Image (cartoon, helix red, strand yellow):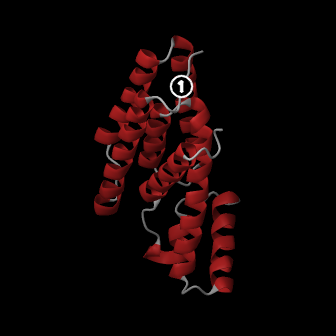
Amino acid sequence: MQLIPLVSDFYYVPVLVALIGATVSVVTDIKWGKIKNVVTFPLIIFGWAWTLIFGDINLFLINIAVTIGLGFLITKTGGIGAGDVKLIAGIVACLQPMYNVVFFLFVLLSFLIAGLLMRFKIHGFKIRKALSAIKEEMKMEGIYRIPDAGYITHGDGIQHIGAPAIFLGLVISTVSALTGGFLI
């Protein structure tokens, strides 16, 4: 299995395409509340084609499996929209499989921090009140399977944080990789 070296000039092309796609998605998510298919599907197709052209068939098949596997896993856990799932799948398709783990971990961390900060802000940074609402939200979603429990417990203050959190995860993981962080 041939991996494209991190220091190769070609390696940066799919990362740059992923950053551009994530940036466009942040704008559309904030402006219209949607991550557009016109951005996500080309990201997926580009990532797979890039891997097939510059990698080998094994890396291509691994890339497809990781993209579909992570997309399926995220969809089954719920909590984020379909556009967020497709954006993550598009970015994952553009990145090498071992880099995806780092990206995915930073995205999860970004979602966690952004979600907590948003909920604390909604409740005036009153920790007890915010934690009580978060506990109620988790109970409603986890035990009773009530959709949109966040809107019920926190009101209309819940905003679109998907694309910005995904973008932040991509930027942090890219900086980490370029500075010799988790991949060396």
The location of residue 56, given as percent across then percent down, is 51, 13
Residue 44 % position (x, y)? 41, 31
100 shown above or below 29: above
The reply, left or right, for residue 138 in relation to residue 57 is right
Residue at the (46%, 22%) spot, across then down: 51
Q: Is residue 182 above or below residue 134?
A: above
**Which part of the image, by quadrant, shows the N terminus?**
top right
- The residue indicated by pointer 1 is 63
Helix, strand or loop under label 1: helix
Residue that sits furthest to the top in the current view: 57
Question: For this rendering, which residue is in front, 118 or 145?
Answer: 118
1 above or below 181?
A: above
Rendered image quadrant of residue 79: bottom right
Q: Residues within 10 Å of mark 1 (few under 14, many from 20)?
A: many
Indicate the quadrant containing the C terminus: top left, top right, bottom left or bottom right: top right
Foreground: 83 or 110? 110
* Amino acid type, label 1: Asn
Q: Quadrant of residue 133?
A: bottom right
Q: Is residue 109 above or below residue 101?
A: below
